Amino acid sequence: MSSMFAHTLVTIVSAASLQAATPDLSADLVALSQRLHMEAQARAQDMARSPAAPVEALPPQDSFLIDLSEFALEAHRLSRAVDDSGGPMDLRCIFRGMSEDAEHRAALLSELATRADHARVYQEVARLTGQAAEIAATPDAQAAALSISCPAETDAQ
């Protein structure tokens, strides 16, 4: 590996911006959405087994809440990527709305008192993340995510 290539690789990997470090925001969101979708479905089924039972709020360090927060951040970043690339306005709004919805659902999981409440929220998260995986995989979303990943490509056009 040439030293110039190694230096460039280290610079990219250590960049503070996810946009500089991740060439395809939509692929990241698809993968995260699919993982959250499966986990949300499993948790919803578990909670539905005894719906009237009380349940404690999820602690901030719960892996599901951490992933849901990451989902909100990635959806917001993809919304900005669509906006920055001049992509479809509705696509930008969809991802921004998904980001806000994920934050809202995370707050609900931190406050609710019955397993039925948590089951409902997990079902809503499963639906949200399932839709996000489908939409983020569309050509418009992929093009928007890729268009900001390499500024040299957009400058050369």
Image (cartoon, helix red, strand yellow):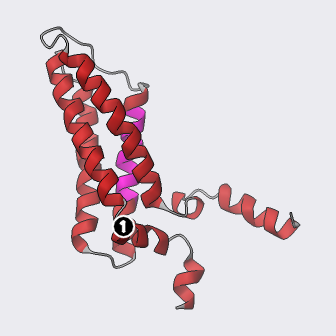
Residue 4, relative to residue 113: is it above or below?
below
Which residue is located at x 44 percent, y 67 percent?
145
Residue 116, relative to residue 107: is it above or below?
above
Which residue is located at x 42 percent, y 73 percent?
143
Which residue is located at x 46 percent, y 59 percent?
25
Q: Position of residue 140 (x, y in %)?
A: 34, 71
- State the residue in front, 16 or 42: 42
Q: Amino acid at mark 1?
A: Ala
- Magenta residue check for 97: no
Secondary structure mostly taken by the magenta-highlighted segment of the chain: helix
Give the residue at mark 1: 141
Secondary structure of residue under mark 1: helix
Q: Give left or right: position of 15 versus 111.
A: right
Residue 66, relative to residue 132: is it above or below?
above
Q: Which residues are magenta?
A: 65-77
The total number of labels drawn is 1
Residue 127, relative to residue 49: is it above or below?
below
- Magenta residue check for 68: yes
Whether residue 29 is visible to the viewer of this picture, yes or no, is yes
Residue farthest toward the left in the current orientation of the protein: 52
Residue farthest toward the right in the current orientation of the protein: 2
Q: Position of residue 1 (x, y in %)?
A: 86, 63
